Image (cartoon, rainbow, N blue to C red):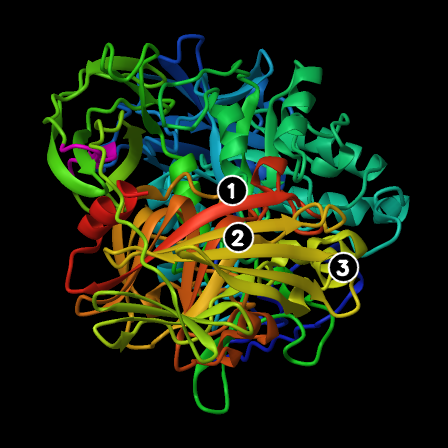
Amino acid sequence: AEFDLTPHLVRGRNLLAVRVYRWSHGSLLEDQDMWRLAGIQRGVHLLSKPRVRIADVKVVTLPDERFEHWTLGVATRLAGAANSELAKYVVVAQLHDHAGKALFDQPLSASPGASKPAWAQSLDDQAVAERTVAGPARWTAETPNLYRLTVELRDADGTVVEAETCRIGFRHVALKDGVLRVNGERVVFTGVNRHEFDAERGKTIGHEQMLADIRMMKRGNINAVRLSHYPNDERWYDLCDEHGLYLIDEANIETHGLKPWERLAKDPEWAGAMLARLTRMIERDKNHPSIVIWSLGNESGYGPNHDAMAQWARRMDPTRVVHYESCYGGPATDILCPMYPVPARMADWSARDHTRPMIMCEYSHAMGNSCGNLHLYWELIWGSKLDTSITWEKLEANPRLQGGFIWDWADQGIRVHAADGRAYWAYGGDFGETVHDATFCNNGIVFPDRSPHPAYVEAQWCYQKVAARWVLGGIDGNREIEVRNRNSFVSLDDLRATWRLLHDGVEAASGGLALPKVAATCAVRIAAPALPTPPAGVERHLVIEFAQLAKSFSAEAGFVVARDQLDLSPAPSVARVAATPVAPTTRDDAIELTAGDVRARIDRARGVLTSFTRKGIELIASPVRHQFWRAYVDNDRGGGATSYATQWDKAGLDRLVERPLACAIDGATVRARHRLAGEGCAVGFDTEIAYALRSDGALVIDVAVAADPLLPANLPRIGLCWDVPERFADAAWFGRGPHENYPDRISSAFVGRHALPVDELAVPYIHPTENGGRGDVRWWALADRGVGLLVGGDAPLQVSAHRCATADWQAAKHTVDVPRRQAITLSVDHRHSGVGGDVGWQPCVHPPFQVHPGRFRYRLVLVGLAGEEPGAVWRERIANGW
């Protein structure tokens, strides 16, 4: 709001008092998914102006067809006197470069009433001047070159009455051939939505927090932000101009709580209020080069009021395009900007409209453990499969697919403290209110304190602007790598390329890659590095990394801006004779297996493994049990009666009762059969486990599961779990990592050797949920100074380890509610459902990442560690010893 205080001032001291109303009729236009926080949330400024004054300055930059010569236009509106008096004043403008040097020998000058060029014909009573600028440094998010424009108002005597200054950029936005272009080039928006929110200050955001957000966005390869769903603090635009982010500036209009949504959009009485919110935004923000799109608002239905807004925006500012999602591709939007299309629908939409680009204004709903399937969108957008395993499989490129904006940037959690002083993040309903829709304000790829979710790392990888793949023809044939520059404007000259060779996840060799000149949007082929001969049987991967040569605003020199992992053919294995199994013995109520200093004990009545020791040290702390259920991720709950959570509850997966059917010795094997079903449920699981202890001390567990076909079409998991003594708190594994990953969100988690303390494996999502999983695990070890347990499988596994049980995550409302138990729960899954992410309100795990009922067979091997190196044990006694 802006007020003229002149009539109310007295000489000397004045008291400024402001009353803020929490609700008004305007609140009906502000029904966004956010905390409803009242009060003064931005700065308060007092501005003193002369009587005859500069009321507004509008700057345009218009290029010629070759983008070499630009017209700089400056339109200045004066106020404070009649036109006859204003005609005696002159406006003088000068352009300065980044060093402060004046660029015009003779400044621009103009007076009100003079003739106006074509671009300014709609501007009434303004002083308009223009000048051609040859070869200016252009502004893009990749090259945020700024100039400083000074505008002076001089009276008839040449005295400077007032001066204003602003930073400008030579930047042009246009639609051509159905593609949105910046400075003539197609741009792909690797974006996020962003609410203004601070965990301790609410909607009041400090300068340092803004800088931190921009820095972290740039590090995450984010180049665009949709200002959801209202104009932001003015300082934000200045910083985005300076550091380079494309912006969608959005009018403060959302009415999704009204039924029908379009009620106000079709009501003439609300036309003025809606238009005013757009005009105020555009008039305030029009000179910022970072803004490339104007948005009419969010989720407000569609009606004549929107058409009037779009018409005004196009007439007053033809240098940008107009966006509005809820007209569903109608005339009020210049771009197709759907919310939450599945990848196939996104491609279909764009295929049906060849005149407009497709830019998703919201997609990949990031609530909790989410953002599964993200890579599927980017395979279509980048025009190639993102699977780096063998070659670069090209898809049919569609230049009109130009990216999107993840929902959203940061969890809107409020920092509060439990009775014992521990801090946690509060969400909707924690203060007794119902308006904040539970966890629907927690949709970020970073936490409220800006620490990253695993989804941030996944987005960082999908969004990266450099990629490396094997050239078609076979990785052991021509041995060429294609390096592709996805930037629109800059080359790769400022990057250093390196490679690392991994043998069974451990670095075996490394070196630099000589990159030729790689211009923007281009690709080159380079020779793969000469690699040493591998030891027999090892699994090989080649990691290619691109790092900054110099320090930048967002990162230090050496920061890796892009990375890829390429598979190599495995080295030929050497056949080994597997150790023979030992004979079981019966003792009281148990069956025992002994091989040297290793002993396993199976309960005869229950048919479960209850003890596994080496050198007298117990390596498990509970019976081994089947696990077919997980603590629900937020996406599991989406869909009400059709949600995965509802289906799993009805099937009794959260309350399975294990009924032993048989346990007997079969030669050197102990076989146990069970039936698992929920209380009162007819459907369930029939299982058989076979235990055999080999003479080398490896316990082989063969598992067969028959899941009834009438069980839900997507099951949470198929696996085993058991407790491990709490002392074995150091985790190491050969698989994907180091960060959390799930079957539909693995692209950024490279296969390698990783190690973390168990306490650092969990991800503290604001609403506790299934978390901390690592996929494609070849082996997993939990140990204490080399003593502990190693688990491997005949196929890659999904593994997690926590100091609490699965049911503890499910029962907790906040992270402080999750107990810390004495033992570590180890979950080892043969199959695990994806987490989904297309939307948050209906089932959204794609079929390839679902676990369908049927028959499953898998094998685990347990080995006790007594100081041996886990990788060597796995290679010698498990991988080559089936």
Tag 2–tag 1 contact (CB < 8 Å): no
Q: Residues within 10 Å of mark 2 (few under 14, many from 20)?
A: few
Q: Circle 2 sits on which residue? A: 51
- For marks 3 and 1 on the same chain, the one whose residue lies earlier in the sequence: 3
Locate residue 32 relative to residue 473 in the image: left or right: right
- For marks 2 and 1 on the same chain, the one whose residue lies earlier in the sequence: 2
Residue at the (37%, 29%) spot, across then down: 139
Is residue 790 in view from this perspective? yes
Residue 843 position, x and y percent, is 69, 47
Q: Circle 1 sits on which residue? A: 744
Q: Circle 3 sits on which residue? A: 26
Question: How far apart, in angstroms, are the residues tagged by discs 2 and 3?
Answer: 33 Å
Question: How far apart, in angstroms, are the residues tagged by discs 2 and 1?
Answer: 63 Å
- For marks 2 and 3 on the same chain, the one whose residue lies earlier in the sequence: 3
Give, as a three-letter code, the residue at label 1: Asp
Q: Nearer the viewer, mark 2 or mark 1?
A: 1
Give, as a three-letter code, the residue at label 3: Gly
Confirm whether the magenta stretch covers residue 544.
yes
Give, as a three-letter code, the residue at label 2: Arg
Q: Is residue 663 above or below residue 253?
A: below
Residue 590 position, x and y percent, is 45, 75
Tell me which segment is drawn in magenta.
Answer: 535-550
Name the element at disc 2: loop
Quarter that holds the C terminus: top left
Tag 3–tag 1 contact (CB < 8 Å): no
Name the element at disc 3: helix
